[in-house]
Amino acid sequence: MSRDEVSVVSIAPKHELITGKMGKLSRAKISAIDIAVPPKLLTNADLEKLVATTDQWIMERTGIRQRHIVEPGVTSSDLGAEAALKILAKTGVAATDIDLIIFSTISPDMFLPATACLVQNKIGATKAWGFDLSAACSGFLYGLQVGAQFIATGAHKNVLVIGIDVMSGIIDYTDRATCVIFGDGGGAALLQPAGEGEDAGFIDFLFEVDGSGGDALCIPAGGSKTPATHETVDKRLHYVHQDGHAVFKMATRKMAEICSRLLERNGLTGQDVDLFVPHQANKRIIDSAAERLGMPSERIIINIDEYGNTTAGTLPLALNSARDKGMLKKGDLVLFATVGAGFSAGAALVRWGY
């Protein structure tokens, strides 16, 4: 299949009989992206002073060179509001025109209210409603697809999807299994309806969860199962705990598998994709998926060396890096992929719109 044929196949609308306020389903597109990253760095050399590790060990096993860390008092809603305001400034969309805010995070400012509510107030989106979406590393991609449905049905015209995590607040910096991996930051995307006849927007998606792997990557205490006590704090149960072997094995298998299934049902292969945007958890996982998909290296964005794993923040950061490097242009067929806690996984095809 040629690259020209891809645009014909992939733009075919689905579910044409479903109608909403605007009649036939509208295709949702990403109109803008931007990021928010704290300036402070935590390098591998810094971690060598905290735990038994080395720069070489971290680079060989993860591909991470540094990660960004917030200053005390800086929250997920602060970073989310920063990314959102950048988008409003660059697009000229007024805060009062935002209909919905979806905030994907596992590090909310607090358990309640939802972080989306705090962002709504900080940016002055007085006519918007919102909610948080907790799907860990899959959060931003899941949030994009949820937001796309509100656009598709005609319920909304301007949806902000934010993927931000301040992982430094829930990471134990005495635990080598986790502290070398995670960083802070993320970004946001504005979703809007594609124009009449415009070849842009969300094409197809495939998401799944397998809750049997839930214990392999979790925060054991703090919820209704194990409320906070002196004992849970002393045992450091309010930090992220990970079975690294189980997570790596699942992610290596699932990222390639779910992408292959999505491409196959759309009559595509890895060669047809202009840009592969995978969740940035581990470079070895990305390389394995790309090899199995037959994806040329020049069409894969990898920036885990700069940011580490920012959980829900990795995909917007990767998109921004791709644009900065000239890897992303209007009309490109973009394949997103994510795997993470839950276990959750997902892949989505998008025709880039700007």
Image (cartoon, rainbow, N blue to C red):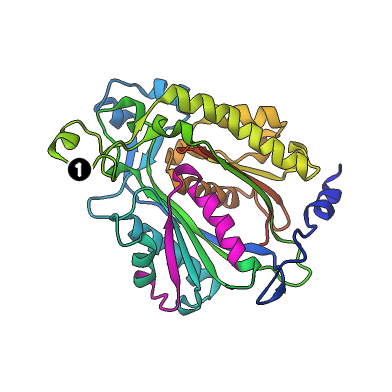
Give x and y (percent) for residue 152. 65, 66
Q: Which region is colored magenta? A: 122-150
Give the mark count: 1
* Residue 54 drawn in magenta: no
Q: Determine the residue positioned at 72% across, 31% down.
A: 294
Q: Would residue 103 be visible to someone looking at this image?
A: yes
Q: Would residue 192 be visible to someone looking at this image?
A: no
Quarter of the figure that contains the N terminus: top right
Q: Determine the residue positioned at 44% across, 71% down.
A: 129
* Residue 124 drawn in magenta: yes
Mark 1 residue type = Ala
Looking at the image, residue 216 lies above or below residue 30: above
Q: Report which residue position mark 1 lands on.
A: 228
Give x and y (percent) for residue 196. 76, 72
Give x and y (percent) for residue 286. 57, 32
For this view, does 191 lie left or right of residue 6?
Answer: left
For this view, does 349 lie left or right of residue 155?
Answer: right
Q: Determine the residue positioned at 41% across, 51% down.
A: 105
- Tell me the element at label 1: loop
Q: Determine the residue positioned at 61% across, 62% down.
A: 149
> Extreme front residue here?
225
For this view, does 130 lie left or right of residue 192?
Answer: left
Give x and y (percent) for residue 104. 44, 54
